[in-house]
Amino acid sequence: MNESSIGEVLRLAREQQGLTLQDVSDALNIKREYLEALEKDEYDAIPGAVFVKGFLRNYGIFLELDGIALAREYKENVEERTPQPEVRTIMPVKKKKVRKDSNKKKKQRQGKWPEITIIAGIIIFLLLIIWILI
């Protein structure tokens, strides 16, 4: 793109067509703030290189520029020079061994309580009805 930055190329093309950032935002459904960031070459304001490339491509095509070339230039001149975060692998956590006997006891205890609670609820409900009717 000669000596002009990607942002300058976009801004000049938009202005030559008499469009505002809001016009482009409405047409492409891209936030106005992101379009401003593209025109100022402030790519860090946009969440992720994938979005930057997509926005550049769509914005360029909308302005009848070579959007694919704009995205490629961004990738070659900006993205590849940007340091990437270090990726670390996470060690798997070892599971505790649980004794099978203790699980059975817990299930047996948990299994009886819901039944007792339901029966108690029914008895209370019936007592309330009898009390109201008397």
Image (cartoon, grey):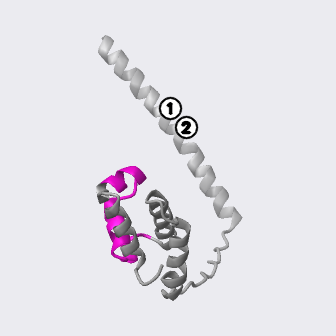
Residue 114 relative to residue 133: left or right:
right
Residue at 30% over, 57% down? 18
Asked if the magenta segment contains residue 42, the reply would be yes
Quarter of the image for the C terminus: give it. top left
Q: Amino acid at mark 2?
A: Glu
- Residue 77, percent from left and from top: 50, 84
Q: Secondary structure at mark 2?
A: helix
Q: Amino acid at mark 1?
A: Ile
Compare residues 1 and 52 and report the one nearer the observer: 1
Q: Secondary structure at mark 1?
A: helix
Q: Note whether 77 is above or below 104 in the view shown.
A: below
- Res 115 label: 2
Instruction: State if disc 1 and disc 2 touch (CB < 8 Å).
Output: yes
The residues tagged by marks 2 and 1 sit, at their Cα atoms, a distance apart of 6 Å
- Residue 111, percent from left and from top: 59, 45
Q: Note whether 53 is above or below 3 in the view shown.
A: above
- Res 119 label: 1
Residue at 67% over, 56% down? 104
Please report the bounds of the magenta region as a residue range: 23-47
